[in-house]
Image (spheres, rainbow, N blue to C red):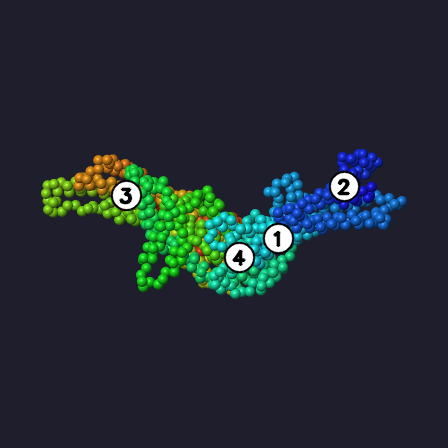
Amino acid sequence: MLHEILLSLSGQPSPLFDSRSEGDAFPLVSPPEKALLASLARLSRLHTELRAHTTLISASHPSVICRAVSTAISSRHLGEFQRKILEVEKDILVEDSAYVGGYGIVPLSTIVREFSPWARRLEWLWETVRFMWHTDSQDRNQVCTGVALIDHLRGESQTGYVDLKEMALHLVGIAETAWMRQLSTWLLYGNLPILGKSDFFIQRDHASEDGHLSAVVQFAVHPELLPQFVTAHTASSILFIGKTLNLIRAKRSAPSANSSAGLSTSPVTLHAEHIEHLASLKSPISASRLSGAVNSIRFSLSQSTLSKLLPLPKILETLSVLHDFLLLRRGEFATALVSHADARVHERYRKHEPSTSRNQPSGVFRGLSMKEGDAVTALSQTLSELYSLQNEEDPADDALDLAKDLLRLSIKEDSNDKAAAIPPDMTEIDMGANISDVAFDNLLFPTPTSLSVQVRPPLDLFLSASDISIYSKIHSYLLGIRRAQIHLGDLWKHTFLRKVHPSPWGPPRSSTPYGQSRLKVGRQRDNTRTQQMRPIWATSSASLFVLSEIGSYFQGEVINGSWQHFQEWIEGGSPSGSRPGSAHSSKSKRSDHPLDTEITSEADFRRPGQTIQRHDPETLTAAHRRYLFCLVESLFLTDVPFTQALRALLTSVEHFLALVIRLESIQRNMDLETDEGVIDALVDYAGEERDVWQSLSAARASVEAGIKDAVARLRDIDDSRSGEGRQMFGFVKDSRENWSFHPTNGPATDPGLCQYVPRKASGVDRLLMKLDFGNANGGIGLGAAAGNFARMA
């Protein structure tokens, strides 16, 4: 029976442990012996199942990491169990006194005691195998990933059993070695691993390949495939290194003669240095050591090849285009774009809606469908107009030439495909989830449009699709305000509404009785219209004042101030303070947010190394995303109530202006009927005028209500920011937003730490002071401004 026990423990089938034949095969086995054999039977079944499943996993599991761990379990740990069986068998055969007693008897309890420690070990190995491959399901979708296995094994190493801890650490070393081989392929050559590429956290970005014209493949980070010891900042650096190597390889393989002009650094030397950094990592891998090794490789590339491939002037040139055109620093661009877009809308309306009723000006363009060619033509005409404004004596406008090459105005796709258009990327801030869903992209055209910049390699190392999407949203937001300002300002160009036009008759016709009568009737009509128009002009003035102040605050204080501060930091200067006049402010004012104080103190302490870090492209990328993140919050784009109030105000102003322009057309036709006798029998202009005046009264009330709501929300924002020392729009809302800026999981001396501290815009209180100053009654609120302007008119 001893021989049968040892054979069964080795994985051979035996009737001794077969429950179906247990009572018939060995009738002389006593119940106590059956109880002792039960534990050995469990070991036999576990050994057999482990052998079968590890063979299956090693042969067919999609994860290379799981295959490596499965092979290690089979070859080492099950091999040790097999060697233990052979040792016991040998000791029994040589009649070792530890096993064999008097008369050559081998107690069964001794055998059970000898294998009892392996019961816990094989049970733990069986749970690990079941974690890798669910034994109760053949669904391949339920098979775990290599990263999940690494995290599971690292967690299992925290146990009170020394033997289990040693086994877990050994398997962790095997798994991390397999993972490091995948990582080294990416870090050294920029290639995805050939085996198990679906298990690696960096994969091809198939969503952007369809619309990408370049031969350079795009990549994205999949957060669900990141091990726990890889911080988000380290993942960003790893992606950056691989994308850089891919770009270098693409440039070297390009047929152009100048494609590799700046790539003179020997890759063999760089690879040797990189291999040393990776070889210094020991299992279990530490997050800080991995971050240090990745940062060393990144700085090695940045100081050698990437400094020529992606120079700092090229980055600044692209940022200037984004600031000038998408953030509307060039006022003439916004004016020309609005003008040509309106011309295209009216042209298409005249073609497709010739029979629309003229007494319904509200939303006459809402059902109008614009084509891609209309947007392209509007942008082309806008840039041509900007070129025509240049004089021969002026120097060449390189920024305008670059903008003509990069800017694209296109019709947006269906909003349901928005998530698919921009793939998730761990290297990007999750700002899209925080920006308000209120749409401003359908103000320029009735169909939603988007002004974007075409990012070509190597600039895609610095700017991502998510960054351009945020810029496009900011552009639509600012352009909506600027467009309303332009249209309200153009309202004063309508001379017929503003004064008596054409001028009344003069002598000698005015000296006749008919002339006197006509002048009297004309004066009465003009006086009546002037009195009726006073509230209209007052509402127009109030809305123009409010929108102008909000737009000036956004453009001057927030955007231009933040850009100048960011530009000084990039160029190596020392930006002074968070806003003008606050460079020597007290510590209490500078430490409104704990993150600012921490980063500022570290930046002051590590000032000698700032120049190299700022010229590192990934550090610039993290600083730019922080700048963009703070820009979004300073523009209140994350405040849903304010964006809703502002959008409602812009819609009300658009409806109000359409009614005023329609009223002008009706009054012109009425004057032609009265003064010149030009009668249109098919139109009742008097009835239309009454309807328009009723609609104007409702529209004016809607505009004033919109002004009240917008200013009230600004007051709420100001109260929320100043109340109890708490900021409504802090830098950090959750871990997803902060990860790419300040890697708190890394060491304090991490060379990849972003040193840039964004500029704080002046408080909303300054904007509210200007709005209150424009209100004659002070604290009543901006809704009463219309009445004040009416009294002043």
Q: Residue at x 42, y 51 (%)?
A: 452
Q: Residue at x 78, y 35 (%)?
A: 21
Q: Residues within 10 Å of mark 1 (few under 14, many from 20)?
A: many
Kind of residue sitting beneath label 3: Ile
Indicate the quadrant containing the N terminus: top left, top right, bottom left or bottom right. Answer: top right
Label 3 sits on residue:
661
Q: Nearer the viewer, residue 428 or 16?
A: 16
Q: Which residue lies under the disc numbered 2? A: 13
Residue 163 percent location from the top left of the image: 72, 50
Kindly identify which numbered label has been placed on residue 179: 1
Q: Work out how far the residue at label 4 is from the one at label 2, CA to CA, in angstroms.
A: 55 Å
Q: CA distance from mark 4 to mark 1?
A: 20 Å
Q: x%, y% of residue 507?
A: 11, 47
Residue placed under numbered mark 4 in the picture = 246
What SS does tag 2 mark?
loop
The kind of secondary structure element at disc 4 is: helix
